[in-house]
Image: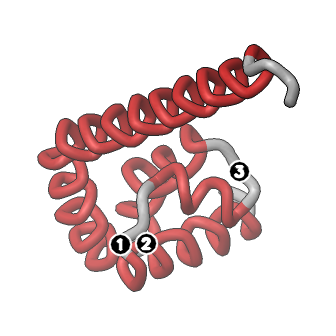
């Protein structure tokens, strides 16, 4: 394994434990794909630092256990945003249809 991969894996692992961020957020912050982050955390980290890998594993399992809640919250926010857009469109349409005075 190349040194830069080991270094990145350790940095991602430590950052993950410190922040408890999602894999997607960390991928964005480090400029790599979420697949790379996941592979770094689940496959490479245990070879490099087993103790840190154990902590990471617990956090990943926790994230997995609550992902249905996060998904539900994201969907709720999405539909709230869409409803707001629809209401704005309707109010703009009504303004356009109102007779000029």
Indicate the secondary structure of the residue bearing disc 2: helix
How many C-alpha atoms fall within 10 Å of the one at disc 3: few (<14), some, or many (≥20)? few
Of 10 and 73, which appears nearest the observer? 73
Corner quadrant of residue 83: top left
Q: Is residue 37 left or right of residue 31?
A: left
Corner quadrant of residue 56: bottom left
- Residue furthest to the bottom: 18
Q: Is residue 26 left or right of residue 98?
A: left
Disc number at residue 32?
3
Q: Examine the rendered structure and indicate whether residue 65 appears above or below residue 48.
A: above
- Asked if disc 1 and disc 2 are in contact, CB closer than 8 Å, the reply is yes
Disc number at residue 8?
none
Badge 1 or badge 3: first in the primary sequence:
1
Query: Distance of mark 2 from mark 3, alpha carbons?
Result: 14 Å
Image colouring = secondary structure
Q: Residue at x 57, y 66 (%)?
A: 9
Disc number at residue 20?
1
Where is residue 38 shown, x and y percent of the image? 46, 47
């Amino acid at each position: 394994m190349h040194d830069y991969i080991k270094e990145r894996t350790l940095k991602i692992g430590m950052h993950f434990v410190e922040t408890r961020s999602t894999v997607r957020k960390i991928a964005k912050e480090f400029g790599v794909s979420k697949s790379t982050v996941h592979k770094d955390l689940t496959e490479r980290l245990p070879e490099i630092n087993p103790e840190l890998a154990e902590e990471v594993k617990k956090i990943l399992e926790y994230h997995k256990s609550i992902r249905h809640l996060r998904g539900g919250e994201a969907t709720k926010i999405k539909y709230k945003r869409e409803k707001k857009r629809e209401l704005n469109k309707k109010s703009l349409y009504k303004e356009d249809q109102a007779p000029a005075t």
